[in-house]
Image (cartoon, rainbow, N blue to C red):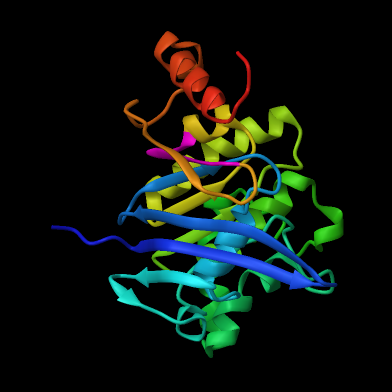
C-alpha cells in the first residue's frame, strides 16, 4: 500500500505573548498521498499558514506528530525537505528572474553554469523566456508568481506547498494561472498542497479539498473531487460542480 508523503496526527499549535494565548490549530489530522493535488480552504485566521509552517519545519507543534514519508520528524529534520512558496513571492529585487530562479540550486552547491542551464531550459514552460534578465519590479503580478513557482520547482523537492499564490491577482490573470499551474503539475507530477480562500479555485484544482474551521483550525471536511483530468473551464458550469461547491460553502458556514 502506498504510504503518505505528509501525515499530521492530532497536531496542535498555540502562540503565546503579552500574557495572552492564541490557539491557532487544534487536533489536526490529515494525509497527503504521493502525486496528489490537495487544496485547503478555511476562513481567515483558521491556521492554514500555520499548518504550512509546521509542515516545512519553521514551527514545532505543541502536541501531535508530523510524518514525512512515514518518518516522524522534528522541525529541524523537516527543514529543506519540502518546497514552500509563501503568499508573497519574496523575489529578491536586486536579482533578475533567472538569478532568482537558481537561488535554491546555488544554496545546494550546484555550479552556476549547471544552475543557469537548468533554469534556462525551463523558462519556456513558465512563459518567462523573454524575461530572464528582467528585474522583479518590472514584472506583472502574474509573471512574478510564475518566477516564484519556477524557483520553488527548482528546489527539486517531491512535495511543494503553495500558500495562496494567486490571491492578490485579478480574476482574469488568476484563471489563466490556474490552468497553467495544472499543466505544470501534470508535467512534474509533484505532490502539491495548495491553500486558498477561493472555494471555486480549490474545487477546480484539487483532487481533494480539506476544509478548516474558524480558529482554532480543525479539519471539518475532507472531500474527494471526482471530476476527470485534465480539467476544462466548462467544468465550472457543470451542476455537479455547483453542488459540490454548495456543500463546501455550507461546511464553511456560508449561507447559499
Q: Is residue 171 above or below residue 146?
A: above
Residue lying furthest left in this view?
1
Q: Quadrant of the N terminus?
A: bottom left
- What residue is rendered at 67% in x and 43% in y? 166
- What residue is rendered at 80% in x and 60% in y? 136
Residue 210, magenta (yes or no)? yes
Q: Quadrant of the C terminus?
A: top right
Residue 154 in view, yes or no? no
Seen in the image, is 85 located left or right of residue 131? left
Q: Is residue 54 above or below residue 207?
A: below
Seen in the image, is 225 located left or right of residue 205? left
The location of residue 162, given as percent across then percent down, is 57, 54
Q: Is residue 212 above or below residue 33?
A: above
Residue nearer the viewer, 231 or 137: 231
- What residue is rendered at 64% in x and 38% in y? 197
Name the quadrant containing residue 131: bottom right
Name the quadrant containing residue 107: bottom right
Residue 232, magenta (yes or no)? no
Residue 184 in view, yes or no? yes
Give the residues in magenta.
205-213
Residue nearer the viewer, 105 or 47: 47
Residue nearer the viewer, 228 or 31: 31
- What residue is rendered at 54% in x and 23% in y? 250
The location of residue 89, given as percent across then percent down, is 72, 59
Q: Is residue 135 above or below residue 45?
A: below
Name the quadrant containing residue 212: top right
The location of residue 59, given as percent across then percent down, is 59, 74
The location of residue 184, given as percent across then percent down, is 47, 48
Amino acid at each position: 500500500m502506498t504510504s503518505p508523503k505528509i501525515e499530521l496526527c492530532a497536531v496542535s499549535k498555540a502562540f503565546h505573548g503579552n500574557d495572552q494565548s492564541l490557539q491557532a490549530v487544534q487536533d489536526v489530522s490529515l494525509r497527503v498521498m504521493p502525486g496528489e493535488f490537495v487544496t485547503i480552504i478555511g476562513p481567515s485566521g483558521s491556521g492554514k499558514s500555520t499548518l504550512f509552517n509546521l509542515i516545512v519545519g519553521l514551527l514545532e507543534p505543541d502536541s501531535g506528530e508530523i510524518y514525512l514519508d512515514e518518518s516522524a520528524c522534528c522541525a529541524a529534520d523537516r527543514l529543506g525537505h519540502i518546497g514552500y512558496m509563501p503568499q508573497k513571492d519574496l523575489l529578491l529585487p536586486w536579482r533578475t528572474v533567472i538569478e532568482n530562479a537558481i537561488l535554491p540550486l546555488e544554496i545546494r552547491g550546484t555550479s552556476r553554469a549547471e544552475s543557469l542551464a537548468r533554469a534556462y531550459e525551463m523558462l519556456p514552460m513558465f512563459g518567462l523566456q523573454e524575461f530572464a534578465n528582467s528585474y522583479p519590479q518590472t514584472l506583472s503580478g502574474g509573471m512574478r508568481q510564475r518566477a516564484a513557482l519556477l524557483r520553488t520547482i527548482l528546489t527539486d523537492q517531491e512535495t511543494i506547498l503553495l500558500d495562496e499564490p494567486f490571491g492578490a491577482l485579478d480574476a482574469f490573470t488568476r484563471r489563466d494561472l490556474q490552468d497553467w499551474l495544472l499543466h505544470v503539475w501534470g508535467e512534474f507530477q509533484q505532490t502539491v498542497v495548495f491553500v486558498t480562500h477561493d472555494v471555486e479555485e480549490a474545487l477546480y484544482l484539487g483532487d481533494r479539498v480539506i476544509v478548516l474551521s474558524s480558529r482554532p483550525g480543525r479539519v471539518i471536511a475532507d472531500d474527494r473531487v471526482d471530476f476527470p483530468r485534465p480539467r476544462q473551464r466548462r467544468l465550472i458550469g457543470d451542476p455537479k460542480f455547483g453542488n459540490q461547491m454548495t456543500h463546501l460553502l455550507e461546511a464553511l458556514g456560508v449561507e447559499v
